[in-house]
Amino acid sequence: MPGGGNRCGLQPISLLQALATIILAVAAAAAAAWPALIAGTSSSTSRVAAANGTCQSRVAPFGYACEEHTVTTEDGYILSLQRIPSGRGETAAGGGGGGKVPVLLQHGLMMDGVTWLMNSPNESLGYILADNGYDVWIANSRGTVYSRHHTSLVSSDSVIYDGIIFIVKIICANYQHCLDENVIIKWDIMWFHVIFFIAYWNWSWDELSSKDLSAVVQYVYSQAGQQKMHYVGHSLGTLIALAALSDQQQQIGMLRSAGLLSPIAFLDKMSSPLARAAADVFLAEALYWLGLSEFDPTGEYVHSLVTDICKQPGIDCYNLMSAFTGDNCCLDNSSVQVFLAHEPQATATKNMIHLAQMIRGGTIAKYDYGNAGDNREHYGQATPPAYDVTAIPGDFPLFLSYGGRDSLSDVQDVSRLLRALGQSHSRDGDKLTVQYLADYAHADFVMARNAGERVYAPLMAFFKLQEK
């Protein structure tokens, strides 16, 4: 063969030594799992923390009624949704919310709906709202443990690893082996799965806003008898709301207000050393280039790369949560244990790339495909369109709560967001309420033992004001 190529017709490729090492490590780790590909089994979904679902594992044991729902997005993702229609010990009128005002809770990045249920009933927002007479709905974004189904695609991460080891096995094998009928069948099955796996994870927070949030809001609105709902988001849950409110005005007609806890919008001042270092070294882009479309923070490959980042000068990952979120003031061991049992959740590597683009670029814009041609194909212009938060109507009520120790929702970035919102919302009226907690960091807003009195009570007072 030309150039002395191997007998399988594969030409040798020169790679950076570090990336080659990662590829070989991935391949070696997958060797034992290859039979699972042919059998059609999935290794990643077996790590479900609570096999019976959120209602049975986190809500019913505390004496609350709870319903499991699903909603299918227009692009085929089947999302899990929990409803707490009544308070503890209360009988839900009519088998539902009984005319109560609905509240939709949306979790943040690499979390799921358990975000709102990690503390005791007296300390967790999901329970508190139900006990205060609200019809509570808890969303779970695509890719999280209970929202991994699709009408036609597969979410299993094992097939890509199994595919890599299969490729490694046939490299440099004799020509006859490359044409072996069983090998060809395995090759075809592998690429069938890989194509559908990559398609499943081909999304960023653009789709969480335009597809997931849109479908869930419409579903809750219908189920609640076309009652307008309050919305509460944490972290990434605030970003997808801001994007939807500025870009999809039809959503506003189904919402009463939005509570934004640890708001994420502009990210270029983000002070989290771990998140910033990951963006600066193009960690997510490297994983995507390696074929890892699913970003699983509990996986050994992501863990290995994060460990390398933690070795960089000036980055202390001794307390990994603090290194990522900031120095949380008020967490206790019980909530941390619940967190460790259920979180963190997987997301799309493309989603992580999108967030890294925001950290490096300082804008709120749609996903950048990296070249003018691809951007024109998706957006009709050479650069990604920006989300204009000043387009959010000035009469739409917003509640923002942020912390002085939060290294993901940095004070400087929130101040920039508030200046932008100030162009449409007056701070003197009741349509924009801002709360600043100097000692709070990112996780405190959903896990702090005192969040009930410090955050949730003012939030519910804001709700009541908008219900008059």
Image (cartoon, rainbow, N blue to C red):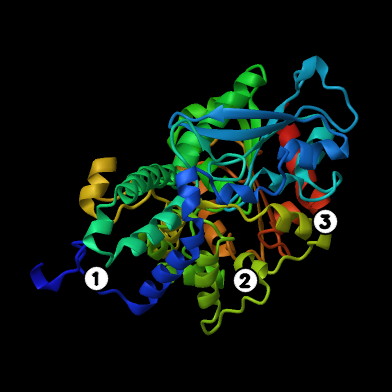
Residue mark closest to the camera, 1 vs 2 = 1
The numbered disc on residue 323 is 2
> Relative to 153, is 85 on the left or the right?
right
Q: CA distance from mark 3 to mark 1?
A: 54 Å
Type of amino acid under label 2: Ala
Work out which residue is located at the far right of the displayed protein and give it: 89
Location of residue 330 in the rendering, given as x and y in whole percent from the top left corner: 79, 62
- The quarter holding residue 80 reads top right
Q: Is residue 404 visible?
A: yes
Q: Which residue is mark 1?
A: 13
First along the sequence among labels 3 and 2? 2
Location of residue 246 in the rendering, given as x and y in whole percent from the top left corner: 46, 39
In terms of depth relative to the viewer, which is nearer, 19 or 286? 19
Q: CA distance from mark 1 to mark 2?
A: 37 Å
Type of amino acid under label 1: Ile
Q: Which residue is mark 3?
A: 449
In the rendered image, the quadrant that contains the C terminus is top right
* In this view, 265 is above or below 89: below
In terms of depth relative to the viewer, which is nearer, 268 or 164? 164
